[in-house]
Amino acid sequence: MKFKTKVYAAIASTDTTAQDKFKDDIFEAVLATGFLCNCDRTRTAPLMLDLQTNYCREVDYYPKTVSKAQDMLKIHMDVI
């Protein structure tokens, strides 16, 4: 069976609890990224550009939870 990611392939033979946790974590990360992407782009453009630039340099600062995305936005808004 072919898996979409190496990480998921590594846990495919383990119990379903690890697979469920992996799926939940990924879903939360997608929600966090969606939260950031749907904010007011005129005010958050510098933050998004920083995240994208760092990701291109293989430095992943994208938040993994919605709570961390909210914190990131709050800090950014307090600075500008």
Image (spheres, rainbow, N blue to C red):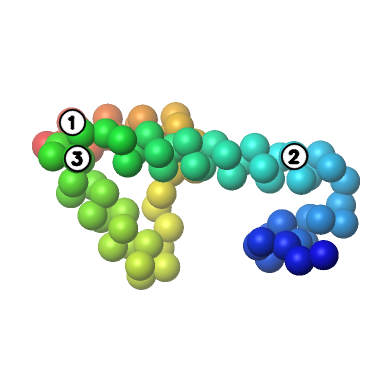
- The residue shown at (84%, 42%) is 16
Which of 14/1 is in front?
Answer: 1
Q: In whole angstroms, how far apart are the C-alphas of marks 2 and 1?
A: 36 Å
Residue 48: % across, % down? 26, 49
Can you identify the residue that label 1 sits on? 78
The first of marks 1 and 3 along the sequence is 3
Foreground: disc 2 or disc 1: 2
Query: Which quadrant of the rendered structure holds the C terminus?
Result: top left
What amino acid type is highlighted by mark number 2?
A: Asp
Q: Is residue 18 above or below residue 51?
A: above
- The residue shown at (71%, 40%) is 21
- The residue shown at (66%, 61%) is 4
Can you identify the residue that label 2 sits on? 20
Residue 65 visible here: yes
Q: State the residue lying farthest toward the front.
A: 1
Q: Dot 1 surroundings within 10 Å: few (below 14), some, or many (20 or more)?
A: few
Can you identify the residue that label 3 sits on? 41
Q: Quadrant of residue 77?
A: top left
